[in-house]
Image (spheres, rainbow, N blue to C red):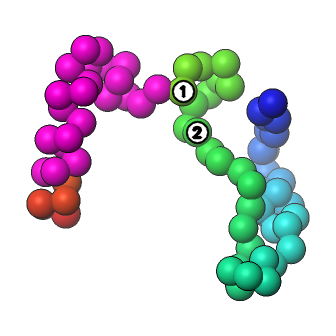
């Protein structure tokens, strides 16, 4: 189940980000949070490419990624 946490201050962010201990294997703090960039947790987990291009998504994704690698 997804747990939603509302962040309203910088202190709230700091508490959330640094609540985990340093991972000895990786030598850094590894948190378990993912920001999905949507204002409502009930929204479908689809990319903007999927939402905006519909059936063309399968044809476009490869070309977009290929061009990104080529020109980045």
Tag 2 or tag 1, which sits nearer the N-term?
A: 2
Task: Assess whether mark 2 and mark 1 are in contact (beta carbons under 8 angstroms).
Answer: yes
Q: Which mark is residue 64?
A: none
Residue of label 2 = 36
Residue at 81% x, 30% y is 1
Frontmost residue, 25 versus 49: 25
Instruction: Identify the residue at horizontal 58%, vertical 39% (top origin).
Output: 36
Crowding at dot 2, Cα within 10 Å, few <14 / some 14-19 / many 20+, comes out as few
53 relative to 28 in the view: left or right? left
Left or right: 35 as drawn, with respect to 62: right
**Magenta stretch containing residue 69, yes or no?**
no
Residue 65: in magenta span: yes
Query: For the residue labelled by badge 1, is the local secondary structure a helix, a strand or a loop?
Result: loop
- Read off the residue under disc 1: 45
Query: Residue at the spot x=25%, y=14% of the render?
Result: 55
How many residues crowd around disc 1 within 10 Å: few (fewer than 14), some, or many (20 or more)?
A: few
Q: Is residue 46 something one can see in this rendering? A: yes
- Residue 60 placement (x, y as % from top left): 18, 31
> Looking at this rendering, what residue extends furthest in the top direction?
55
Q: Nearer the viewer, mark 1 or mark 2?
A: 1
Q: Marks 1 and 2, how far apart in space? A: 8 Å
Q: Give SS at disc 2.
A: loop
Q: Give the magenta-colored segment's residue range.
A: 46-67
Percent position (x, y) of residue 23? 78, 77
């Amino acid at each position: 189940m997804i747990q939603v946490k509302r962040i309203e201050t910088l202190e709230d962010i700091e508490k959330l980000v640094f609540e985990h201990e340093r991972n000895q294997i990786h030598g850094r703090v590894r948190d378990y949070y993912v920001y999905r960039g949507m204002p409502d947790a009930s929204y479908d987990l689809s990319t903007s490419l999927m939402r905006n291009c519909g059936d063309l998504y399968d044809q476009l994704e490869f070309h977009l990624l290929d061009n990104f690698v080529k020109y980045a």
